[in-house]
Amino acid sequence: MPKHKVTDAVLEAHLMTIEPENKIEEFAQAGADLITFHIEATNQSQSVIHKIKGSGSKAGVALNPATPLSSIEEILYDVDIVLLMTAIPGGAGHPLLKHSIDKVKRLHNIIRENDYKCFLEVDGGITIENAKDLREAGANILVSDTALYESTDVWASLAMLTGE
């Protein structure tokens, strides 16, 4: 999937903006392999997904912590990744919200029961202490900046986060 001159890494653009449909082309041209938008930021989610895919990128949808899973159930078949925000967005170091692990389990079950092909990503409050619980609940991808940046041994912390 990566198509970059200087890295083989997958580059994800997480659009935390209103009217994400107005930013898709810009991020796709900049090289985003995956463009994720917030379901709360548009009333044209299906159109946004198709515009992202038409740009050559993979499409992701994100949900803020208080947004119900029902808001994305009708589009899960068409996205490549679902990003659950598991802490209040807006800054590093916010704790994992208590209901997050249950919400990950519920979404994982919806994905599995319907044989959807999307990944389940979680972002917010991910620590070495809760990473295993989130992976066991069904998360495929964990976003954890604070746990790594504040670590004295990044490689050991990364191994604990990934379970390797």
Image (spheres, grey):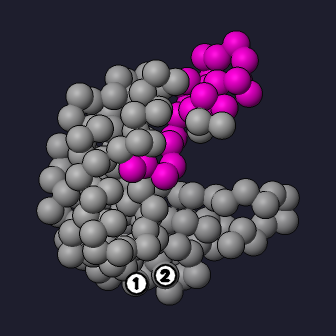
Q: Nearer the viewer, residue 34 or 121?
A: 121
- Residue 135 part of the magenta-drawn span: no
Name the quarter where the N terminus is drawn.
Answer: bottom right
Whether 128 is drawn above or below 84: the answer is above
**How far apart are labels 1 and 2 at the CA level?**
5 Å
Whether 154 is drawn above or below 134: the answer is above
Labels 1 & 2 near each other (Cβ < 8 A): yes
Question: Percent x, y for residue 22?
Answer: 40, 71
Question: Percent x, y for residue 87?
Answer: 32, 33
State left or right for residue 149 relative to residue 65: right
Q: Secondary structure at mark 2?
A: helix
Q: Is residue 15 visible?
A: no
Q: Which residues are magenta?
A: 138-161
Q: Secondary structure at mark 1?
A: helix
Q: Is residue 4 visible?
A: yes
Q: Quadrant of residue 70?
A: bottom left
Q: Which residue is mark 2?
A: 53
Name the quarter where the C terminus is drawn.
Answer: top right
Whether 33 is drawn above or below 62: the answer is below
Q: Nearer the viewer, residue 148 or 88?
A: 148
Q: Which residue is mark 1?
A: 50
Which mark is on residue 146?
none
Residue at the image point whose x is 47% and y is 77% from the top? 52
Residue type for callout 2 = Lys
Q: Residue furthest top?
A: 152
What crowding class fits label 1: few (fewer than 14 Cα within 10 Å), some (14-19), or many (20 or more)? some
Question: Percent x, y for residue 57?
Answer: 56, 75
Residue at the image point whose x is 53% and y is 34% from the top? 144
Residue type for callout 1 = His
Residue at the image point whose x is 17% and y is 43% from the top? 66
Q: How many marks?
A: 2
- Residue 155 part of the magenta-drawn span: yes
